[in-house]
């Protein structure tokens, strides 16, 4: 039986923290669907098409990850509906710090109430990447700081173009 996991997020932009979760999940699942959310309640720096392109460049061009094992999609539905569509019963979530846990715990509980066949699996990024957030990466680059330890080269180029 093929095991498929859904890794939802805004990825605005993708960071090494996200990438750690993806790499770890590839060891556990046959296929990982990186689901880029296009919800209306967020103020994104990059539109959905830009974020999809940035994620694909980071994963497949910069890092040369296996295109056969990773699918990058956009979505506007409930994550539980996405699981049903792709025949997955696993939602992946990344944890950075204890402060993430309360929100993630509530989210996992709600997803479980929506569909009790779905499990949420929490993966932690490597220690050196646990402090990285998309919000901080955007702020640092906006103020002219160096972000090469936080994300891939193509993502850095996209961020710099946005702020030029």
Image: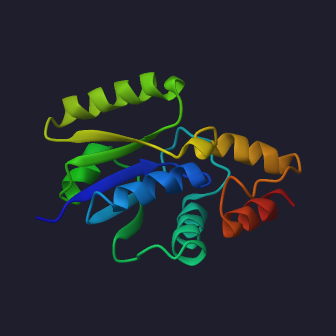
Front in this rendered view, residue 109 or 80:
109
The residue lying at 53 percent from left, 23 percent from top is 99
Rendering colour mode: rainbow
Which residue is the extreme one toward the left?
A: 1
In the rendered image, the vertical position of residue 80 relative to residue 14, given as above or below: above
Q: Is residue 15 visible?
A: no
In the rendered image, the vertical position of residue 140 relative to residue 23, given as above or below: above
The residue lying at 52 percent from left, 75 percent from top is 60
Q: How many marks?
A: 0
The residue lying at 80 percent from left, 61 percent from top is 160
- In the rendered image, which quarter is residue 94 located in? top left
The residue lying at 10 percent from left, 64 percent from top is 1
**x, y percentage for residue 21?**
45, 51
**x, y percentage for residue 154?**
68, 70
Front in this rendered view, residue 128 or 144:
128
**x, y percentage for residue 58?**
58, 68
- In the rendered image, which quarter is residue 105 located in? top left
In the rendered image, the vertical position of residue 37 relative to residue 127, given as above or below: below
**x, y percentage for residue 36?**
46, 55
Q: Is residue 107 left or right of residue 54?
A: left
Q: Is residue 126 left or right of residue 143?
A: left
- In the rendered image, which quarter is residue 121 located in? top left
Which residue is the extreme one toward the front?
A: 127
Question: What is the quadrant of the C terminus in the image?
Answer: bottom right
Q: Is residue 91 visible?
A: yes
């Amino acid at each position: 039986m093929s095991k498929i996991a859904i890794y939802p997020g805004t990825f605005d932009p993708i960071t090494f923290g996200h990438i750690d979760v993806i790499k770890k999940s590839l060891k556990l699942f046959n296929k990982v669907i990186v689901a880029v959310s296009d919800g209306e309640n967020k103020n994104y720096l990059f539109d959905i098409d830009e974020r999809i392109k940035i994620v694909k460049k980071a994963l497949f061009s910069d890092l040369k990850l296996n295109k056969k094992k990773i699918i990058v999609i956009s979505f506007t539905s409930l994550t539980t509906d996405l699981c049903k569509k792709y025949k997955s019963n696993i939602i992946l979530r990344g944890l950075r710090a204890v402060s993430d846990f309360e929100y993630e715990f509530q989210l996992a509980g709600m997803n479980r109430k929506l569909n009790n066949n779905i499990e949420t699996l929490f993966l932690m990024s490597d220690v050196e990447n646990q402090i990285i957030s998309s919000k901080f990466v955007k702020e640092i680059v906006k103020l002219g700081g160096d972000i090469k330890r936080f994300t891939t080269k193509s993502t850095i180029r996209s961020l710099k173009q946005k702020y030029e």
